[in-house]
Image (spheres, rainbow, N blue to C red):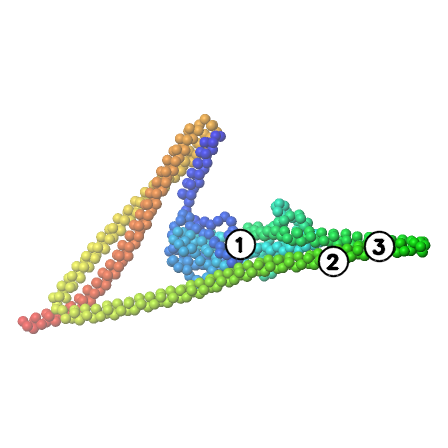
């Protein structure tokens, strides 16, 4: 198959996956692998609505089935509801600020703990009959930086690497400067409060390598930490000097022993010569012995000076050892100071977090107080409006009593006319509702026709895919494949256009539904007003009838 044919097949496969995506319904998506977090570091549990859309006015629930209460977070009508949430998760869980507006219900877990490991469920309730859920497994681990220390054993180096407070139990590995694995000896791990601490050591030749790396990794949480250690040059010089001085001392000791043996042999020979020689030759013999003694004394003095020099070298060696220990102590002090600074910065950060949490709590209390004040103000305003209305009613009653019978009848006629107008308005709104419902029915029919058209086009695409599969067996029919691909692209654009039309019509249907609901509410309100006005008319008629009888009686009396 040629390159063009393979590219055409790949494009067709992409179109097929695109069509499947277009045909898909609403669903929740996350990530294929478990969410991995570290103790003390924020992690995010993904949960998104596909296709994206606002869920700000819906009900979002995060739960964990192995806990009681099971609720981790509840989001309803654009606000969080912390009352039913498990106490261990309060003030540690939150959503992204604009997340629900964009269909993102991902959960931010602050200051995770090892006990937060488990399976969480993201649930979206659109309405009573439409609910979606997604399970999100979470694994929380703990890590730290490994620490390397150096010791010496004769002409070898001993390195120790320690990693504290890991979870789950990690593995350790040593490598030299050539990235070759160095065999190590594991020391029994220690488990303290669910955390693991491991220790290993290696013993290497003095000049085997200048740099060693200790690597600690945990595959379950996909975490790795490395620490490098470079052997100081001054340490190597000191060790070489120490070995050299040791060799010098050993050679000097052998020389001194040999010299003493020679002296003993010579003394024995001289003693024998003195017994064999005559008294006449005594004087030259004494002179030779005296010169020999002088030479031996000089050699002894040279040996003593050499021993003094060696003692000075030993003192220098001890001084170098002391200086090296001072350097190691200074490096340890520097490391401890860095740890203290890190801990102080962490304490400062935690204090800032506590201040922020207290400020958030105070602001929440202020918001509650403001909402309570607003509610009381609304109640006061309602009561004032009710008092005003009652006062107006009293004024109207006094006005009605004061008005003449003609004014009462005119107001009665005016109210009857208003009732008739409102009834005609209700009739007109009902006719509009019927027209809009018929329009909705027509749009739905169009949507169904367009969906059937989409189905037909998809069937055509499938037929064309089978045709392309047949044409792929013959390389000479590539031009036919190109033509079919162009038809597929045209049909894809047609499908996209139809989908856009469907979306526009669905939005139009939604808008018409909203208008219908508003008009129905308006009809209900007008019906209530009509009932109130009818009751008011009945009451006024009851008040007018005695006045009419009284006026009639007065007229008859006057006549």
Q: Is 328 situated left or right of 516 in this image?
A: right
The residue at which mark 2 appears reads as 308
Q: Is 351 situated left or right of 530 in this image?
A: right
The residue at which mark 1 appears reads as 139
First in sequence: mark 2 vs mark 1? 1
* Outermost top residue: 476
Residue 299: percent from left, percent from top: 80, 54
Say which of 194 and 322 sits in front. 322
Q: Is there CB contact under 8 Å for labels 3 and 2? A: no
Residue at x 33%, y 48% (from the top left corner): 507
Residue 491: percent from left, percent from top: 37, 36
The quadrant where residue 500 appears: top left
Nearer the camera: disc 1 or disc 3: 3
Residue at x 53%, y 59% (from the top left corner): 342
Residue at x 48%, y 61% (from the top left corner): 349
The residue at which mark 3 appears reads as 291
The quadrant where residue 271 appears: bottom right
First in sequence: mark 1 vs mark 3? 1
> Few, some or many C-alpha atoms within 10 Å of disc 3 (few <14, some 14-19, many ≥20)?
few
Nearer the camera: disc 2 or disc 1: 2
Tell me: residue 444, above or below residue 107: above
> Few, some or many C-alpha atoms within 10 Å of disc 2 (few <14, some 14-19, many ≥20)?
few
Q: CA distance from mark 1 to mark 3?
A: 91 Å
């Amino acid at each position: 198959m040629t390159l063009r044919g393979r590219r055409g097949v790949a494009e067709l496969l992409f179109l097929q996956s695109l069509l499947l995506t277009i045909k898909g319904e609403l669903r929740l998506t996350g990530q294929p692998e478990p969410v991995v977090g570290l103790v003390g570091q924020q992690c995010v549990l993904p949960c998104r609505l596909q296709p994206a859309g606002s869920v700000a006015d819906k009900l979002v629930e995060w739960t964990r089935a192995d806990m009681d209460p099971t609720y981790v977070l509840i989001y309803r009508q654009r606000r969080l509801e912390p009352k039913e949430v498990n106490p261990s998760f309060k003030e540690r869980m939150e959503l992204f600020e604009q997340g629900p507006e964009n269909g993102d219900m991902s959960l931010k877990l602050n200051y995770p703990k090892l006990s937060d490991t488990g399976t969480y469920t993201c649930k979206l309730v659109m309405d009573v009959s439409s609910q979606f859920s997604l399970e999100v497994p979470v694994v929380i681990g703990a890590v730290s930086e490994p620490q390397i220390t150096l010791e010496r054993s004769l002409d070898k180096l001993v390195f120790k690497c320690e990693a504290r407070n890991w979870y789950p139990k990690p593995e350790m590995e040593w490598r030299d400067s050539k990235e070759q694995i160095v065999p190590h000896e594991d020391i029994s791990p220690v488990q303290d409060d669910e955390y693991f601490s491991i220790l290993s050591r290696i013993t290497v030749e003095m000049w085997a390598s200048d740099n060693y790396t200790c690597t600690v990794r945990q595959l379950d949480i996909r975490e790795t930490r490395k620490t490098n250690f470079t052997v100081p040059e001054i340490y190597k010089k000191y060790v070489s000097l120490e070995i050299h001085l040791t060799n010098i001392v050993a050679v000097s000791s052998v020389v001194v022993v040999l010299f003493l043996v020679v002296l003993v042999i010579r003394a024995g020979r001289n003693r024998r010569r003195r017994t064999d020689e005559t008294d006449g030759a005594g004087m030259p013999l004494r002179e030779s012995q005296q010169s020999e003694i002088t030479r031996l004394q000089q050699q002894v003095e040279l040996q003593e000076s050499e021993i003094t020099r060696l003692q000075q070298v030993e003192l220098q060696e001890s001084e170098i050892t002391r200086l090296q220990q001072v350097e190691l102590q200074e490096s340890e002090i520097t490391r401890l100071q860095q740890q203290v600074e890190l801990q102080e910065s962490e304490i400062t950060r935690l204090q800032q977090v506590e201040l922020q949490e207290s400020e958030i709590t105070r602001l929440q209390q202020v918001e509650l107080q403001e909402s309570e004040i607003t509610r009381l103000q609304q109640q006061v305003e309602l009561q004032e409006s009710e008092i005003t209305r009652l006062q107006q009613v009293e004024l109207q009653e006094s006005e009605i009593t004061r008005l003449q019978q003609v004014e009462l009848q005119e107001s009665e006629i005016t109210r009857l006319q208003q009732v008739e107008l409102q009834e005609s308005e209700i009739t007109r709104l009902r006719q509009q509702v019927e027209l809009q419902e018929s329009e909705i029915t027509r749009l739905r029919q169009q949507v169904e026709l367009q969906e059937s058209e989409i189905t037909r086009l998809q069937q055509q695409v499938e037929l064309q895919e089978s045709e392309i599969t047949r044409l792929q067996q013959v390389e000479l029919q590539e031009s036919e494949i190109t033509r079919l691909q162009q038809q597929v692209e045209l049909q894809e654009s047609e499908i996209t256009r139809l989908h856009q039309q469907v979306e526009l019509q669905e939005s139009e249907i939604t808008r018409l539904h909203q208008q219908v609901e508003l008009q129905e509410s308006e009809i209900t309100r007008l019906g209530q007003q009509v009932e109130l006005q009818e009751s008011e008319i009945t009451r006024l008629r009851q008040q007018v009838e005695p006045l009419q009888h009284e006026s009639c009686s007065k007229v008859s009396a006057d006549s």
